[in-house]
Amino acid sequence: MHGFVRMYWAKKVLEWTLNAATAYAVAVYLNDKYSLDGRDPNGFVGCAWSVGGMHDMGWAERPIFGKIRYMNDKGCQKKFGVAEYIKQQQASFYAYIMSRSGGSAERHAEKPATARASGAKHPRS
């Protein structure tokens, strides 16, 4: 997972949990379970920076975040190729699923993201 993406979702976890301690525990758990650098010091520091402001300057106080640097999706889109990253990750995930199910990703013309965007229902729904 790209560090910028980890920062963004860890800050979202902070918004969705009751306090920073819970947010940090959830962020570390998710990072350790799903990120390639899980259980690596960089992952712990990335979560600590996002949720607790470790190694960052203080910002103006605001609801939920306190003095922690705020990130939103518009900032991510300006500083990071979000659409391209999502497209790349969906393709990788789709290829992985197809390899695990014995299918071939090349056989299928329409990937799930394209089907959902066109309004088609997911095959399992």
Image (cartoon, grey):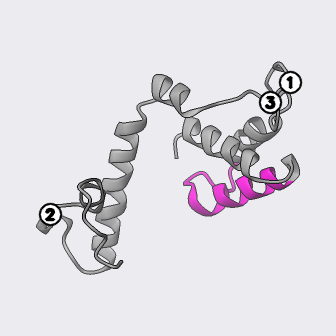
Tell me if 28 is positioned left or right of 34 in this view: right
Residue 73 occupies quadrant: top right
Identity, as a three-letter code, of the amino acid under mark 3: Ile
For the residue pair 34 and 70, the one nearer the viewer reads as 70
Compared with 38, 52 (above or below) is: above
Verify CB contact (< 8 Å) between mark 2 and mark 1: no
- Mark 2 lies on a secondary structure that is helix
Tell me if 18 is positioned left or right of 31 in this view: right
Q: Quadrant of the C terminus?
A: bottom left
Q: Which residues are magenta?
A: 22-41
Identity, as a three-letter code, of the amino acid under mark 2: Glu
> Which residue is at 23% across, 55% downward?
118
First in residue order: circle 2 vs circle 3: 3
Circle 3 sits on which residue? 68
Circle 2 residues within 10 Å: few <14, some 14–19, many ≥20: few
Circle 1 sits on which residue? 61
Please say whether residue 42 is visible from this viewpoint.
Answer: no
In this view, the mark in front (1 or 3):
1
Circle 2 sits on which residue? 106
